Every structure is written in structure tokens, then in C-alpha cells.
């Protein structure tokens, strides 16, 4: 076994019985233990302590702050395939939530000093501030291949500078964790109270703006909403009222919205759907325009009679090609989901509008008899960089068309 800590030669993993397990490499201060007994030794970064969750991989080469603070990553330990995570530092503008929902991260090389004009602090300091545990110095390619071939395992991650690491105890934690299937995590990351949102998107030299022309009113149901989604709605002239995931249809409609937005979020949509689906079915009957993203897309499919299933690996990255079947255009999208909508389960009034060019899975649908549509990917993100902005424009156009129809009556 390789026991060096050089960047060129990362510590390797061992999948062995407790009796045959090799000794800890000298200087190891952190470990990741998978539920099949695989052990990855490394150097700890970020906060200290122990966390348990599903281990997934993300292929993005930028946006690590956004990824770590995306509420959709609740319950997950993220293995970054790009080897230079942390090289541009961190800043307060690139977070997607007030608190980080991810359980931890795994990276190939040590975090270097910031090398970007927008950096306010180093990534290691930022991780400590957000209480995020990290493991550096392992062969992330080997871990990625393991996840790719066998699916995302449950794992326990620890950072213990004093070297007090009990592998057997960590293995027990990893094996005892129930996994994301059947788990409702939206309740953990949703807001607790209703609030108003008026901040618009970031611009070079100007930072974030403020909504000045309130042309429409949208209620956003927060299943784990990213801030940049709310900013994009505001940038399209929408005053946004954000309500908790558990809000009833009556509570939502009390705000008299022109349109309703269903946010992204973590966990199993079938579990969240136990309380969300009846609400969405009531909202669908109102005829108001509805737009869903990610978990919102999946919940909307359940509300119209569709089904969702857990994917073998999921889609997590910023380079995913998605084809718009109605225009023939291909969008480069940002994605983060481990469940998918089964298109054959959708009713006849649901038309599939988008598909993944990676695996053919469903990426969007619209209803033919209502101003309702949704997509699986994240159109507020900018890998394309603006390939998917038209979806927000479509939403506000549906709102304006319905308002015009009401005004004509």
C-alpha cells in the first residue's frame, strides 16, 4: 500500500476485513469508510468531527462553493473529480444558502492559497466556517470508478487532527445509515417562515442588484431553493414570496400569486410527496402558471400521476447536454439529482420536452391543458452559460398571458 502524502502519489484505499486491514499510514488525520468496508486514508481539511451520508461524485471544475451550499446535497458527501478544488478561494457572494447542507467533501490535492481576484478567504477557512468536513490526498479517480460501477455507497467521513480514528465504529455508522431512498430531506433545508425576496442576479462590477419594477408576483415553494433561482425570478421582474415546503394550498393562494414556482431540493421525491403532492394537486386545479425545477419537477410528476425512481449514479456536474425536443436545440446544463421521472408513467396530457443526451432520461415535460411545465436540470446556473435562461422567460410569459386573459374577461 502506498503510504505517502505527496500530491503525485495519493493515499490508496483498502477493501479488506478488519483482520487483514493494513495499519494507518503515517500522518493520516482523516478517513472515509464506505459501508462495504473500503477505507480511504488522507489528510483532513475544513472542520473536525464525523459525518455520515451517501457518497456521490461531481464532475464540475468550477462552482465548488455553490455546490457545497446547494441544499439539494443534503445528506451527501461529495467526491470532486476535478483535482484542484479550492484554488480560487472563497467569497460571500457565491453561496446558495445561509447554511451548508452537504455532509462533507473528498478532494485529490491539498487546498492551495487563493488565486483569484474575487477571493476573500481560503477555501479551508471557509469550510471551517460552514462546519464542513473534508478529506484530501486520496485517489478520487479510483473512488469515482467505484461509485460509477457499483452506485453511490453510504459512508462515514472523519477529520481528527489528534489521530483518534476508530475505523470499526465508522464502518458501523456507514452500515447503519438508512440511505436517501425513502428519506424526506426537504424538511431539513426548507425555510421555517415565509419571507420576501427581491435580490437580482450578479453582474460584473455591480454585484447583486435589487428588484425595482415588480411586474409579477410569484410564490416559490421552498423544498431547498438555491438563492440564484430566486435571484433569476427577481431579475425577470417577479416579486417573490418564499413559503416553507409544508405550506398548504390555502396558505400559498392567500398571497394571491400570479404564478407558482416549485424549487429544487434533496431526498426522495416520493417521501416529500406524501405532504407535497396533495397541495400541488390543489394548485393545479387553479389554472395558475406553475414552473418546477429538479425536486419540484419530480414532485409535479407525482402530482399528475407519474412515478420516480432512484438512479444508479444520478447526474451531478456542469457539463450535461440536454436536448429540447420541441426546438431541437442542445443545452449544456448544470445538474444535481439522484432520482428521475419515469416518462412512460406520465399521463397523456404531459408532453416530454427535454431529454438527457447522456442516458436518455427525462429532463422536462409540459402539460397540454394547463400553463404548467418543469425541468430536471438547473436553468439558473450558467454552464452554457445562458442556454437555459429562456425557461424563466417562458414562465413569465405564461403569467403575462394568463393575466391578459383575465383582464379581457
Image (tube, rainbow, N blue to C red):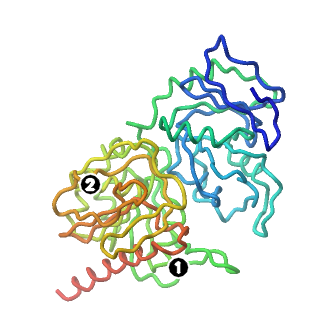
Q: Is residue 6 left or right of residue 369?
A: right
Of all residues shown, which one is farthest toward the top? 19
Q: Which residue is mark 2?
A: 343
Marks 2 and 1 sit apart, C-alpha to C-alpha, by 37 Å
Residue 114 position in % (x across, y down): 80, 59
Q: Residue at x 80, y 31 (%)?
A: 161
Q: Secondary structure at mark 2?
A: helix
The reply to whether callout 2 and callout 1 are in contact (CB within 8 Å) is: no
Q: Residue at x 75, y 41 (%)?
A: 45
Please identify the quarter of the rendering in which residue 268 is found.
Answer: top left
- Neighbor class of circle 2 (other Cα within 10 Å; few <14, some 14-19, many 20+) is many
- Neighbor class of circle 1 (other Cα within 10 Å; few <14, some 14-19, many 20+) is many
Q: Nearer the viewer, residue 330 or 76?
A: 330
Q: Which mark is residue 41?
A: none
Residue 396 position in % (x across, y down): 37, 78
Q: Which residue is mark 1?
A: 211
Q: Nearer the viewer, residue 379 or 211?
A: 379
Q: Residue at x 23, y 86 (%)?
A: 407
Q: Secondary structure at mark 1?
A: loop
Q: Nearer the viewer, mark 2 or mark 1?
A: 2
Please identify the quarter of the rendering in which residue 203 is found.
Answer: bottom right
Give above or below for 175 relative to 298: above
Q: Earlier in the sequence, mark 2 or mark 1?
A: 1
The N terminus - image quarter: top right
Q: Is residue 408 left or right of residue 135?
A: left
Amino acid at each position: 500500500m502506498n503510504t505517502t502524502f505527496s500530491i503525485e502519489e495519493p493515499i490508496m484505499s483498502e477493501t479488506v476485513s478488519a483482520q487483514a486491514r493494513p495499519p494507518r499510514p503515517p500522518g493520516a488525520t482523516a478517513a472515509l469508510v464506505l459501508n462495504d468496508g473500503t477505507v480511504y486514508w488522507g489528510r483532513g481539511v475544513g472542520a473536525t468531527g464525523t459525518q455520515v451520508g451517501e457518497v456521490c461524485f461531481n464532475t464540475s471544475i468550477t462552482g465548488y462553493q455553490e455546490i457545497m451550499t446547494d441544499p439539494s446535497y443534503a445528506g451527501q458527501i461529495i467526491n470532486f473529480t476535478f483535482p484542484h478544488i479550492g484554488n480560487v478561494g472563497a467569497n460571500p457572494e457565491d453561496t446558495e444558502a445561509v447554511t451548508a447542507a452537504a455532509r462533507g467533501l473528498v478532494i485529490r490535492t491539498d487546498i492551495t492559497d487563493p488565486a483569484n481576484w474575487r477571493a476573500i478567504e481560503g477555501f479551508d477557512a471557509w469550510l471551517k466556517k460552514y462546519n464542513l468536513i473534508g478529506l484530501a490526498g486520496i485517489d478520487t479517480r479510483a473512488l469515482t470508478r467505484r461509485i460509477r460501477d457499483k452506485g453511490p455507497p453510504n459512508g462515514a467521513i472523519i477529520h481528527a487532527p489528534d489521530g483518534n480514528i476508530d475505523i470499526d465504529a465508522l464502518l458501523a455508522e456507514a452500515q447503519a445509515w438508512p440511505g436517501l431512498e425513502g428519506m424526506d430531506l426537504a424538511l431539513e433545508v426548507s425555510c421555517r417562515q415565509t419571507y420576501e425576496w427581491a435580490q437580482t442576479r450578479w453582474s460584473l462590477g455591480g454585484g447583486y442588484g435589487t428588484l425595482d419594477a415588480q411586474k409579477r408576483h410569484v410564490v416559490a415553494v421552498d423544498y431547498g431553493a438555491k438563492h440564484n433561482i430566486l435571484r433569476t425570478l427577481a431579475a425577470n421582474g417577479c416579486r417573490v414570496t418564499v413559503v416553507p415546503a409544508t405550506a398548504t394550498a390555502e396558505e400559498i393562494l392567500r398571497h394571491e400569486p400570479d404564478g407558482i414556482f416549485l424549487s429544487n431540493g434533496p431526498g426522495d421525491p416520493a417521501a416529500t410527496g406524501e405532504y407535497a403532492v396533495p397541495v400541488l394537486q390543489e394548485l393545479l386545479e387553479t389554472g395558475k402558471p406553475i414552473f418546477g425545477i429538479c425536486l419540484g419537477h419530480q414532485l409535479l410528476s407525482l402530482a399528475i400521476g407519474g412515478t420516480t425512481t432512484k438512479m444508479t449514479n444520478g447526474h451531478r456536474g456542469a457539463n450535461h447536454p440536454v436536448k429540447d425536443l420541441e426546438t431541437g436545440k442542445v443545452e449544456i446544463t448544470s445538474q444535481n439529482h439522484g432520482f428521475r421521472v419515469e416518462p412512460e408513467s406520465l399521463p397523456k396530457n404531459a408532453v416530454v420536452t427535454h431529454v438527457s443526451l447522456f442516458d436518455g432520461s427525462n429532463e422536462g415535460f409540459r402539460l397540454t391543458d394547463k400553463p404548467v411545465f418543469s425541468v430536471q436540470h438547473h436553468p439558473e446556473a450558467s454552464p452554457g452559460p445562458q442556454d437555459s435562461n429562456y425557461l424563466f422567460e417562458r414562465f413569465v410569459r405564461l403569467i403575462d398571458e394568463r393575466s391578459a386573459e383575465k383582464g379581457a374577461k
